[in-house]
Amino acid sequence: MTITIAAIYEKGVLRPRQPLELAEGTEVRLTISPAVGEPQPAEPESPLCSEIDRLAALGPNWDGYGAGALDRAILDAARQFVARFATDPAAQPLVVPMSNGALQFEWHKGQRILELEIEDPETIHYLKWDPAEGIQEEDVFAIKDVEKANRLIHWFVGVGADV
Amino acid sequence: MSEARRGAEVPASETLSRAITSADWWVAAENRVSSAAFAFPVFSVDIASMATPEETLDRFRLGSGLVQFNAGAGRQLGFDARQELDEDFPDNLAHANVYCALPKSERKRHAQQLVLLTSVVRIPALSRQEPPLD
């Protein structure tokens, strides 16, 4: 079996950018090639990626109600997703684990709320919520629809028109 | 659990307590709970008239928070509380499961409406770096 992964070299250690489905103690052979100039997935040092990594480390029963660990495929999809959308540094979302193994990004400002839940690796289920403006919109869109995600985020931060 | 085998309906007058067991479920900047705390399609609560906040919180990680909402108001939103034993804590007679039979396409709106119903009894004092439970 051969797999190709992205990794970063830091302080003498190669750190994979995504979880590996390998048993503890598995020995592997490495062939290293610099990735400069290739498309990169999530920026490894971004706060959002760090948050996703933190949630990936949650073990069984992390919520005290018997939840399992978060879904690996959803975590990977979340890493890819955050690499695509442009967030205003002043409006970084919370990254919130769900008991069903999913995760969602949440923006809150008073009654205005935006939730983007990665409910499966292909789909985002969103809530656009601002009762003062009469907005209670809920729908799904393909995770690859970056334009839709950015329009929703722009709505939240007050940039641009309705989506 | 199938609808036919569910426990007794929790009276509409009762208050329900939900422990906030993850720091990630607390929106500190807005002093409110995240809708993520209300798992779909079913989540656990205690009936407040049968368990004090301390008794509920004793079953969870130290520092967990607690919010409450009215059973009848929750039912009007589609969250049906049934008094049922918790297999992990069979001595807890206050336990109820809250079932949400709403279509998946409506659950986030209703969960957010449920957030609006909640009152905060105890703000969580959990670290986001808290290790997982065994």
Image (cartoon, grey):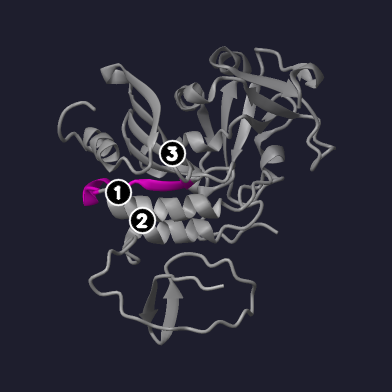
Residue at image location 57% in from the left, 57% down from the top = A58
User: In this figure, which residue is indicated by the disc labeled 1?
Assistant: A92
Q: Is residue B29 visible?
A: yes
Give percent across and percent down for residue A11.
Answer: 38, 85
Position of A155 with respect to B127 (left or right) is left
Q: Residue at the spot x=63%, y=22% of the render? A: B15
> Mark 3 packing: few (<14 Cα in 10 Å), some, or many (20+)?
some
Tell me, for residue A123, which label it has, or none.
3
Marks 3 & 1, CB-CB < 8 Å contact: no
- Label 2 belongs to which residue? A48
Q: Earlier in the sequence, mark 2 or mark 3?
A: 2
N-terminal of the pair, mark 1 or mark 2, is: 2
Q: Is residue A126 magenta?
A: no
What is the residue that sits farthest to the left in this orientation?
A: A160
Asked if disc 1 and disc 2 are in contact, CB closer than 8 Å, the reply is yes
Instruction: Write the start and end of the magenta stretch as one range.
Output: A86-96
User: Callout 2: 10 Å neighbours few (<14), some, many (20+)?
Assistant: many
Residue B43 screen position, x and y as percent? 64, 32
At 21% across and 26% down in the image, what residue appears? A162
Q: Secondary structure at mark 2?
A: helix
Query: Compared with residue A77, is residue A126 higher up or lower down, i.e. above or below?
Result: above
In 3D space, how far apart are the residues under numbered discs 1 and 2 (Cα atoms)? 8 Å
The answer to whether marks 1 and 2 sit on the same chain is yes
A130 on left or right of A99? left
**In this rendering, the label closer to the viewer, 3 or 1:** 3
Name the amino acid, label 3: Thr
